[in-house]
Image (cartoon, rainbow, N blue to C red):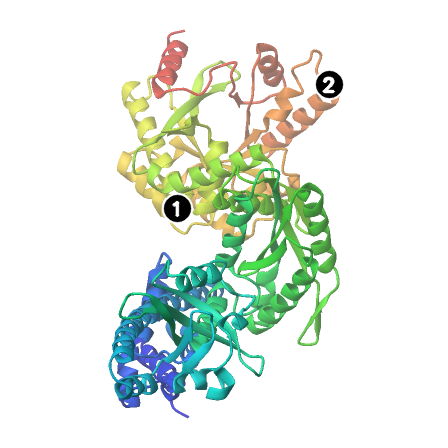
C-alpha cells in the first residue's frame, strides 16, 4: 500500500488522479489518461483554493463546471462522477487544516456551484449547436424549395441524406413525404407516417401558441415558425424536438406545401432536466436546496392580494455532538431520516420542505389561512422529531428549534423573511431549544442591531471610537477621593454613546475584548500617571485606578506580561492599579485560572472581587483568592434607600464587612445615591464607595477637580 502524500501539492495531485480515473472512462477525448489528469489538475487547484478561502466564492465552482464542458466532458455520467468524487475526496485531500464540519458544508456549496456552472455552459453550448442546426435547416429549406422547382433527383438526394428529420405535407395537413431521419425518430415506416394528418400529433405539453402559429402558416399569414414540441411515439414514449415549419410557395407565390424540419432533442432535454434537478436539490437528502427554496419563496411573496405565507426555520439541537462523537457518516444518516420525516409533514397543497445546508431545514406553506396552517405545520414537525432515530445501533433523540415567520405576500423580500426566521430560530434555541417561537419585529430589530455592532467592533478600536469615563472612589471616613474606576464607552457613528453592557458581551464573544481590554488598561494607567503629575507627586495622596477584567482576559496568556509592560512604560507603581474581577468569574476557579491573579497580586497590584454577593460563592473561598478588595454589589445599597433600613440587610452587610476586615480585605460599595446611604455604610465599617451621590462617570478632568476640592478643604 503506497504512503499517503506528504505535502499539499502531493495531496492535490492525488485528488486530481482520483478524479481523472473516475471521469476518463466516460469522456470522449483523444488524450491519454495522464494528459487528461494534467487537464484536471488546474481545476482541482481552483477547487482546493475555494475550499480553503476565507470567504466563499461560488464563482470558482461555476468556473470549474464550465471548464468541464469546454473540455468536451459532456456525457451525462461526467457530472455525476465528478460530484461524487468532490464530495468524497476534496475535504480529505485539500482540507487538512480546517474544521471538518465547516469544510464539508463548504464542499457541498462548491458542488452546487459546479453543477450550476456545468448546466449553464452546457446550455450555452446547446444553444450554439441549435443555432448552427437552425442555419443548416434554413439552408436545407432553401435547397428543398429549389429542388422542388428543379429536378426530382437532386431533391431526393438532399431529402434522404439530411441528418435532421424532414416531412412535407399539404396545406390540409396530410403528410406526403418523410425522410429516413424522421422515420427513425418516430420508429415508424414510411407507410406508417404517410397519410397521417399533422393535427393528430397534439401533445399535452404543447405550448399555447403552437396551433395558432400552425393555422397562421397554412393560411399564408406566416412564412415560418420555430418552437419546441413533444410527440408521442407508437410505444408511448415521448419524442422531444426542435421543430421548424416553413411555408413553400409555387413559382407564382401561392402557398402550396408545408415543410417540417425536426431535430431530436430528447436526450439533451433529459440531461438538462437531470442537471436542473441536481442544481436545485440537496445531494444527501434529495430535498430541494437553498436555490430551489428561494425560487419558491420569491414566488410565494410575489403572489396576488389576499395571499399569505408561513415559514418554519428549523435547526437541530446538538447535532454537532452527533458528528463529533459518532462521525459524519452517522450524522449524514441522521439528516436523511430527519429529511424523510419532514417531507412527510408537508404534503398539503402549497407546502414544501427544503434543506438549506448542515442541519438547517425550512418548511413553507402558502395560501389564505397560513396564520393557522403554519402553527399546525410547526407542531407536526416537532411531533415528527419525538421518536428516536436509530443510527449504528444507537437510538438518538432528536430535538429542534424552530423560528416561525408568517405574513401577507408582497411586503418583504425573501432575504428579509429568511433573516427574520433565522433570528427567531436562534431566539428559540437561546430559550433552551426543543420549541418554536414566532417572529417579533422588536426582537428582530434588536438582533439586527447586535449583529451590526458585532461586525463594526473590529474596526471601531482602530478608528478611535472608544473613550473612557471615570467615576471617583471616595473614602467614607474623610470623604477624600482615593481613585477612580475606568468605564469604557463606545461613541458609535449611528447609535451614539453606548454603555459597556451593550458591547462588552459582543466583544467577549468575538475575542475583541482582549485588545480592547489592553487598550483600556493602558489608557487608564496613563491617565493615572497624568493625575499624579498634575497633583505634584503625593501632594493630594495617591490616586488609584480601577480597571475591569473580563473572564476572557483572565484566561489570556498575555495578561501578566501586558500589565507589567504597561506599568513599566508609564512609570507607575503596581499599587496604583486595581484590577476588578466579577465574583461569578471566580466561582469554582482552579489554580490555573488563579495563577495570573496571584502573580499580579505578588507584584503589588490590588485585585478587587467585583459584584460580591451576587455569585453565591462559598465565603470560605475568599481565603484562597488573591484579592485585597471586596466590592459589594449595588443591590445592598438599593435595600438601604428606605428609612429605617431593613435590620436583616444591615446585619448581612455588617457581617460581610466584619469578615472582610478579618481577612485584611478592604470593602468598597457601589451604587451610593444618597447621603443617608453613605452615612449608614460608614457606620457599618465600609471603607470606600462610589455612586451618583458623589459623581456620575465623566471625563478625567472632573476627577482632578474633585480631588483638588478635597485637598483644599
- Mark 2 vs mark 1, CA separation in Å: 43 Å
Give the image location of residue 257, x and y in percent.
37, 72
* 299 over 525 or under it: above or below: below
Q: In this view, does 626 lie to the left or right of 541?
A: right
Q: Which of 634 and 400 is in front in this view?
A: 400
Q: Is mark 1 on a helix, strand or loop?
A: helix
Q: In this view, does 13 lie to the left or right of 170?
A: left
Q: Nearer the viewer, residue 176 or 417?
A: 176
Which residue lies at the image location 43% right of the left edge and 38% below the top edge? 452
Which residue appears farthest toward the bottom when viewing the image?
1
Q: What residue is disc 1 on?
A: 560
Q: What residue is disc 2 on?
A: 646
Q: Is residue 204 visible?
A: yes
Q: Is residue 222 left or right of residue 327?
A: left
Give the image location of residue 636, x and y in percent.
64, 24
Q: Which quarter shows the C terminus?
A: top left
Q: Is residue 88 visible?
A: no
Q: Nearer the viewer, residue 133 or 422?
A: 133
Amino acid at each position: 500500500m503506497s504512503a499517503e502524500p506528504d505535502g499539499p501539492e502531493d495531496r492535490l495531485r492525488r485528488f486530481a488522479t482520483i478524479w481523472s480515473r473516475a471521469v476518463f472512462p466516460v469522456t470522449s477525448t483523444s488524450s491519454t489518461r495522464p494528459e487528461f489528469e494534467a487537464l484536471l489538475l488546474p481545476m482541482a487547484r481552483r477547487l482546493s483554493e475555494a475550499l480553503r478561502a476565507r470567504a466563499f466564492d461560488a464563482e470558482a465552482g461555476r468556473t470549474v463546471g464550465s471548464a468541464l464542458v469546454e473540455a468536451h466532458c459532456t456525457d451525462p455520467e461526467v457530472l455525476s462522477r465528478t460530484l461524487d468524487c468532490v464530495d468524497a475526496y476534496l475535504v480529505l485531500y485539500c482540507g487538512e487544516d480546517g474544521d471538518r464540519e465547516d469544510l464539508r458544508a463548504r464542499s457541498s456549496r462548491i458542488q452546487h456551484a459546479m453543477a450550476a456552472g456545468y448546466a449553464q455552459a452546457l446550455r450555452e453550448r446547446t444553444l450554439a449547436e441549435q443555432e448552427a442546426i437552425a442555419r443548416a435547416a434554413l439552408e436545407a429549406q432553401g435547397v428543398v424549395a429549389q429542388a422542388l422547382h428543379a429536378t426530382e433527383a437532386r431533391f431526393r438526394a438532399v431529402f434522404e441524406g439530411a441528418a435532421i428529420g424532414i416531412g412535407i405535407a399539404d396545406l390540409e395537413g396530410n403528410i406526403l413525404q418523410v425522410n429516413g431521419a424522421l422515420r427513425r425518430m418516430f420508429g415508424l415506416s414510411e407507410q406508417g407516417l404517410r397519410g397521417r394528418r399533422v393535427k393528430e400529433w397534439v401533445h399535452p405539453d404543447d405550448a399555447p401558441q403552437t396551433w395558432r402559429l400552425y393555422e397562421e402558416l397554412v393560411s399564408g399569414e406566416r412564412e415560418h415558425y420555430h418552437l419546441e414540441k413533444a410527440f408521442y411515439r407508437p410505444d408511448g414514449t415521448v419524442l422531444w424536438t426542435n421543430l421548424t415549419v416553413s411555408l413553400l410557395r409555387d413559382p407564382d407565390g401561392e402557398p402550396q406545401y408545408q415543410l417540417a424540419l425536426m431535430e431530436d432533442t430528447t436526450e439533451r432535454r433529459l440531461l438538462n432536466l437531470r442537471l436542473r434537478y441536481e442544481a436545485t436539490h440537496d445531494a444527501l437528502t434529495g430535498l430541494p436546496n437553498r436555490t430551489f427554496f428561494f425560487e419558491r419563496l420569491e414566488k410565494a411573496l410575489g403572489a396576488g392580494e389576499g395571499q399569505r405565507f408561513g415559514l418554519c426555520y428549523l435547526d437541530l439541537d446538538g447535532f454537532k455532538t452527533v458528528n463529533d462523537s459518532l462521525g459524519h457518516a452517522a450524522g449524514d444518516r441522521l439528516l436523511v431520516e430527519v429529511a424523510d420525516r419532514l417531507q412527510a409533514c408537508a404534503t398539503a397543497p402549497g407546502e414544501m420542505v427544503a434543506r438549506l445546508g448542515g442541519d438547517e431545514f425550512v418548511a413553507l406553506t402558502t395560501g389564505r389561512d397560513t396564520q393557522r396552517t403554519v402553527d399546525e405545520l410547526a407542531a407536526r414537525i416537532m411531533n415528527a422529531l419525538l421518536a428516536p432515530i436509530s443510527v449504528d445501533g444507537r437510538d438518538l433523540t432528536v430535538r429542534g428549534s424552530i423560528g416561525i415567520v408568517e405574513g401577507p405576500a408582497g411586503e418583504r423580500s425573501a432575504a428579509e423573511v429568511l433573516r427574520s426566521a433565522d433570528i427567531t430560530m436562534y431566539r428559540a434555541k437561546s430559550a433552551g431549544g426543543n420549541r418554536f417561537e414566532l417572529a417579533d419585529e422588536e426582537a428582530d430589530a434588536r438582533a439586527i442591531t447586535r449583529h451590526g455592532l458585532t461586525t463594526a467592533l473590529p474596526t471601531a478600536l482602530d478608528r478611535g471610537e472608544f473613550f473612557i469615563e471615570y467615576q471617583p472612589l471616595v473614602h467614607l471616613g474623610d470623604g477624600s477621593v482615593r481613585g477612580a474606576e475606568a468605564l469604557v464607552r463606545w461613541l458609535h457613528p449611528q447609535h451614539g454613546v453606548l454603555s459597556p453592557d451593550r458591547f462588552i458581551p459582543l466583544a467577549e464573544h468575538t475575542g475583541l475584548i482582549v485588545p480592547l481590554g489592553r487598550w483600556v488598561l493602558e489608557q487608564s494607567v496613563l491617565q493615572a500617571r497624568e493625575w499624579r503629575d498634575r497633583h505634584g507627586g503625593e501632594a493630594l495622596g495617591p490616586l488609584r485606578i480601577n480597571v475591569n477584567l473580563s473572564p476572557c482576559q483572565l484566561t489570556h496568556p498575555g495578561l501578566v506580561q501586558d500589565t507589567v509592560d504597561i506599568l513599566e512604560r508609564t512609570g507607575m507603581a503596581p499599587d496604583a492599579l486595581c484590577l476588578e474581577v466579577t465574583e461569578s468569574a471566580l466561582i469554582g476557579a482552579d489554580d490555573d485560572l488563579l495563577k495570573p491573579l496571584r502573580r499580579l497580586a505578588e507584584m503589588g497590584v490590588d485585585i478587587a472581587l467585583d459584584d460580591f454577593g451576587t455569585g453565591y460563592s462559598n465565603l470560605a473561598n475568599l481565603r484562597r483568592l488573591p484579592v485585597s478588595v471586596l466590592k459589594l454589589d449595588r443591590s445592598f445599597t438599593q435595600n438601604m434607600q428606605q428609612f429605617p433600613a431593613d435590620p436583616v440587610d444591615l446585619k448581612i452587610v455588617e457581617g460581610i464587612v466584619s469578615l472582610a476586615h478579618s481577612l485584611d480585605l478592604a470593602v468598597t460599595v457601589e451604587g451610593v445615591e444618597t447621603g443617608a446611604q453613605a452615612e449608614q455604610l460608614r457606620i457599618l465599617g465600609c471603607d470606600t464607595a462610589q455612586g451618583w451621590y458623589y459623581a456620575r462617570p465623566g471625563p478625567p478632568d472632573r476627577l482632578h477637580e474633585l480631588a483638588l476640592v478635597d485637598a483644599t478643604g
